[in-house]
Image (cartoon, rainbow, N blue to C red):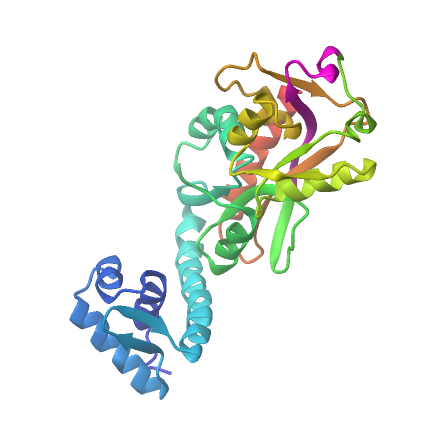
């Protein structure tokens, strides 16, 4: 195994991501001939072709895809070995790769960013935004350290912690009959046209589950790419939607054409939590991050 070098696996993973020898070489800070030659040596050592080389197209063979999958895990493990020693000296220093799903990040970050900078001043937060499925993939592959998303999710090989609960609210056009009420019952929405985010957003599935209790169905005419687009579609009179509490409280543009009302108790809600690999070496930093978010949201109530 002495000839199987992590650097060669890094080159292969970079090529799998870039699908271009020049871009992969640039990412690895080597020349293109060097990267190409090392990958040929790797194929020769393994005794199998990993790359299909075409004039303007680079693809991986089936075996190449399988090797890349395992190489990602090996590279992540090697990084964690280095981190284990480095962060043992100061567990609240260094960088932490943190990702949010799009229906949480823009609304939670303004509330906690200042406290994170103040209380974790030695920690450099690298922030990302992904939908739930790609967030989990990047977490498992080692590209991220921790994610903030809606629970529950598939937690195989992962650990989770509940941070706070967030009630849903109803957003409707300002001239809607229900806008005259101080709160809305779920049954009041039975005959309404439901507007939702497009496929891939966990909030879509949560809203469908809640509204399905009263037989309410989605409008097939519109699907939004973001909560702000969804907000504007409702304001334009195309239907009603469910907004998480933090998103509903955020002020965006002209709100005069939109009415947001809470649900009557017990209000439907979602659970927001943190998720990370059980093998992480950044547990102390993750715990500190979670503590700040939980304390902030507890004070906000």
Residue 235: % across, % down: 58, 21
**Quick check: 77 above or below 43?**
above
**Quick check: 91 above or below 265?**
below
Q: Residue at x 18, y 71 (%)?
A: 34
Along the line of sight, the residue nearer the viewer: 290 or 23? 23
Residue 222: % across, % down: 58, 37
In the picture, measured across the screen, residue 26 lies left or right of residue 284, that is: left
Quadrant hosting residue 79: bottom left
Image: magenta residue range: 162-180
Q: Is residue 53 visible?
A: yes
Looking at the rendered image, the quarter that the C terminus falls into is top right
Looking at the rendered image, the quarter that the N terminus falls into is bottom left
In the picture, measured across the screen, residue 71 lies left or right of residue 296, that is: left
Residue 244: % across, % down: 63, 30
Q: In the displayed orientation, state which residue is furthest to the front.
A: 221
Q: Residue at x 81, y 38 (%)?
A: 215
Along the line of sight, the residue nearer the viewer: 176 or 290? 176
Q: Main secondary structure of the magenta part?
A: strand
Q: Residue at x 71, y 41 (%)?
A: 208
Is residue 164 a member of the stretch shown in magenta?
A: yes
**Quick check: 90 above or below 73?**
above
Quadrant hosting residue 261: top right
Q: How many marks?
A: 0
Is residue 232 a member of the stretch shown in magenta?
A: no
Q: Is residue 273 visible?
A: no
């Amino acid at each position: 195994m002495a000839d199987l070098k992590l650097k060669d696996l890094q080159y292969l993973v970079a090529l799998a991501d870039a699908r271009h020898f020049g871009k992969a070489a640039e990412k690895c800070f080597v020349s293109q001939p060097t990267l190409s030659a090392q990958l040929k040596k790797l194929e020769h050592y393994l005794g199998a072709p990993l790359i299909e080389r075409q004039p303007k197209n680079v693809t991986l063979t089936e075996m190449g895809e399988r090797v890349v999958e395992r190489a990602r895990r090996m590279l992540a493990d090697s990084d964690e070995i280095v981190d284990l020693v480095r962060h043992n000296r100061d567990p609240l220093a260094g960088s932490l790769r943190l990702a949010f799903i799009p229906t949480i990040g823009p609304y939670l970050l303004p509330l906690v960013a200042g406290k994170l900078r103040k209380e974790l001043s030695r920690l450099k937060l690298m922030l990302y935004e992904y939908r739930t499925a790609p967030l989990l993939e990047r977490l498992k592959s080692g590209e991220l350290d921790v994610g903030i998303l809606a629970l529950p999710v598939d937690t195989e090989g992962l650990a989770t912690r509940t941070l706070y609960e967030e009630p849903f609210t109803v957003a409707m056009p300002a001239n809607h009959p229900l806008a005259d009420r101080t709160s809305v019952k779920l049954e009041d929405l039975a005959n309404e046209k439901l507007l939702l985010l497009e496929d891939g957003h966990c909030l879509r599935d949560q809203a469908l589950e809640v509204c399905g209790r009263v037989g309410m169905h989605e409008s097939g005419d519109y699907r939004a790419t973001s909560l702000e687009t969804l907000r504007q579609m409702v304001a334009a009179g195309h239907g009603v939607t469910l907004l998480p509490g933090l998103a509903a409280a955020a002020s965006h543009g002209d709100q005069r054409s939109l009415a947001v009302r809470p649900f009557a108790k017990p209000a439907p809600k979602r659970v927001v939590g943190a998720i990370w690999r059980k093998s992480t070496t950044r547990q102390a930093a993750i715990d500190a991050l979670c503590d700040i978010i939980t304390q902030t949201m507890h004070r906000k109530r």
